[in-house]
Amino acid sequence: MKSMPQMSFGKIEPVTSGPPVYSVTEITRLLKRCLEEEPLFQYVTVCGEISNFKHHSSGHMYFVLKDAESSIRCVMFRSFASRLRFRPQDGLEVYATGSIGIYETGGVYQLYVQYLEPRGVGDLHLAFQQLKEKLKAEGLFDEERKRPIPFLPRRIGVVTSPTGAAIRDIITILHRRMPSVEILVAPALVQGKGAAASIVAGLETLVRWGDVDVIIVGRGGGSIEDLWPFNEEIVARAVAASPVPVISAVGHETDFTICDFAADLRAPTPSGAAELAVPVADELLAGLGDLKMRLRQTWLQYASRKREQLGHLERILQGYNPVDTIRQRRQRLDELAQRMEQAVERKVTKERRELHLAAQRLDSLSPLSVLGRGYAIARDGKTGKPVVSAAQGEVGQELEVLLKDGSLRTRVEEVHQGSCGQREKEPGVGEVGVD
């Protein structure tokens, strides 16, 4: 195996000196790249017993191949699974051919199966498998080199036995589906000694002189020995080298040959090849009529939408009329002015109400308001400081008594201490009256 490649992306710089650090995703991708670049794993056949088989609704097949000591996960995508002639099931021993890769999300390696065959066919199967692997490695089976089949071929070439049932079925179905198509038959041996060379000669004749748009090559069903000419290397190479698209139609639906893999398209039977080669003329005419009707309906709907859009644009243009815009703006200005006046009036009323309430609160807290209820305020006659306690009074001290409507100038004759209304003499202090 090749040495591990150096990755230039996503490397995390370590905090301290040492080897580079990779994330889980990066190391998984690194391993995946190593596997994908290893030729041994690009095309490999694995033999084992199927378990945990699941045919997903998408058409993909998922299963595990196992033996006595190990197992490997496998996936066969719909494009390859649709070619199977048998239905896989748990417990069946098979040969699975494909490439080894890594499923990044799960971080596990698995076999991407392209071909799946039951085990135990014998020596012919081994020869078949060896040739298939050889041609596969050369790229003869690559999907990229396969050409599309013409939709409406003018002339179709057929390489098969002129006396077999296959040619009768092909001609009958071609004429029924597309009566105008021309059919050119290149007779060939399709069984026994020399059959492979005869098939190649028929292909070359049609390509060189036939002026055909597509070629059908094949025969009816038979044993693996009967179908073997279509497993010969010269036939596979001739089919792959043909400049004209080739449809392989060998045997029954369950039969597979090397010719099927080399051809541009595989048909399950000769009758199926005829159906794949041309469409049904009556269906095409009916489809054209339907398309004509749909085109007319689409055009009418399109015209209706455009009329609606035109009306909408006209209404928009009317909305941008400058005279109307000025008129609308004037009316809006009047509305805003009225709303502003109302807002100012509401603000002034609110401020007046709050001012009145504040004045009432200040008046209730004013000392003059207290004096109006029969109370008086005493201040020292010299300093003017309020006298709020009997302890501040002295006999002979001059006081100014503030009343509601004026003031009195008086002198302290007696000092009484205690609760309001009591006249208990304070020890050591004589009674003092006020003038």
Image (cartoon, rainbow, N blue to C red):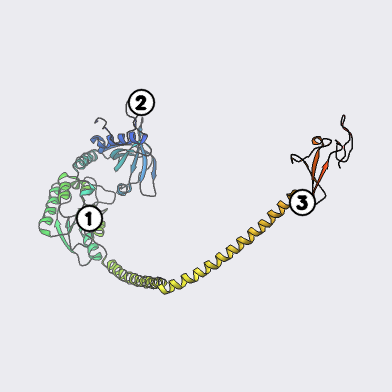
- Please tell me whether residue 117 is drawn above or below residue 349 in the rendered image: above
- SS of the residue at dot 3? helix
Front one among 301 and 240: 301
Give coordinates of residue 243: x percent, y percent.
15, 53
In depth, the one of 153 and 392 nearer the eye is: 392
Residue located 30% across and 42% down the image: 113
Could you classify mark 1 by the number of other residues whose Cα lies within 10 Å: few (under 14), some (14-19), or many (20 or more)? few
The picture quadrant where one finds residue 74 is: top left
Amino acid beneath label 2: Thr
The answer to whether residue 192 of the structure is visible from this angle is no
Q: Which numbered circle lies on residue 407?
A: none
Q: Tell me the SS state at disc 1.
A: loop
Is label 3 or label 1 in front?
A: 3
Task: Tell me, yes or no, if residue 256 can be seen here.
Answer: yes
Q: What residue does disc 1 label? A: 148
Q: Decide which of 276, 107 is in the foreground and name it.
A: 107
Q: Position of residue 406 (x, y in %)?
A: 79, 50
Q: How far apart are marks 3 and 2 (CA)?
A: 84 Å
Q: Which numbered mark, 2 or 1, is in the foreground of this view?
A: 2
For the residues labelled 2 and 1, the Cα–Cα distance comes to 59 Å
Residue that carries the numbered disc 2 in the rendered image: 16
- Identity of the amino acid at label 1? Pro
| x 83%, y 49%: residue | 374
User: Is residue 391 or residue 115 the one in the foreground?
Assistant: 391
The quadrant where residue 318 appears: bottom left
Q: In this view, does 153 lie above or below 217?
A: below
First-in-chain label (2 vs 1) = 2
Q: Which residue is drawn at 23% across and 38% down?
A: 126
Which numbered disc flags the more N-terminal residue, 3 or 2? 2
Disc 3 target residue: 369
